[in-house]
Amino acid sequence: MASSSGTSSGSGSGSYTLHNSGSEEDLQQLMDQRKRKRMISNRESARRSRMRKQKHLDDLMSQLAHLRKENNQILTSMSVTTQNYLNIEAENSILRAQMSELGHSLESLTEIINFLNANSSGSIIESSMADGFIQNESWNYMYHPIMPADIMQY
């Protein structure tokens, strides 16, 4: 029995070895096929990753261009606003000077009116007119409207 068992085992082993080597070959082919699929899948994944990376870079470059354009627009707007502010400040200074000058003119006119009211006798007024007192420059402001051209000379 031992010999039959050994023969049977030997022939079984030989048949198993043949079958096993075929199976190993199939297994190797299967592993190679899986390896190729994995390699193709990895290449495709790497390609998609590069594409995503490139798209992200393109998006960032687009955003950078947009932000630079927006920044230039803001700088231009600030420059225009600053220039307008300086122009208004200059105009405001002119108006303040004119207001001060008109205030002094008003005070002079008020003094003239007070003087005329205090000296209401006809002879003093007539002599003052003859002397040219009423022709004083301060008096003329009362009858001379201020025009835009007058304002611009200040």
Image (cartoon, rainbow, N blue to C red):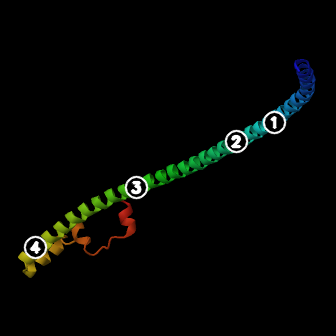
Can see residue 57?
Answer: yes
In the image, which is nearer the foreground, mark 2 or mark 1? 1
Q: In the rendered structure, are the residues bearing label 1 and label 3 in contact, judged by CB atoms less than 8 Å apart? A: no
How far separated are the C-alphas under marks 3 and 4?
42 Å
* Residue occupying the point 9% across, 79% down: 123
How far separated are the C-alphas under marks 2 and 4?
88 Å
In the image, which is nearer the foreground, mark 2 or mark 4? 2
Residue type for callout 3: Tyr
Where disc 3 sits, the SS reads helix
| Sequence-wise first label, 2 or 1 | 1
| Sequence-wise first label, 2 or 3 | 2
Residue 62 placement, left or right of 80 = right
| Sequence-wise first label, 2 or 4 | 2
Residue type for callout 1: Arg
In the image, which is nearer the foreground, mark 2 or mark 3? 2
How far separated are the C-alphas under marks 1 and 4?
115 Å
How far separated are the C-alphas under marks 2 and 3?
46 Å
- Residue that numbered label 2 is attached to: 54
- Residue that numbered label 1 is attached to: 34
Residue type for callout 2: Gln
* Local crowd size for mark 3, using a 10 Å CA cut-off: few (<14), some (14–19), many (≥20): few
Residue 46 placement: quadrant: top right
- Residue that numbered label 4 is attached to: 114
* Residue occupying the point 17% across, 74% down: 130
Q: Nearer the viewer, residue 41 or 61?
A: 41
Where disc 4 sits, the SS reads helix
In this picture, is 1 found above or below 54? Answer: above
Q: Nearer the viewer, residue 40 or 67?
A: 40
Residue 145 placement, left or right of 67 = left
- Residue that numbered label 3 is attached to: 85
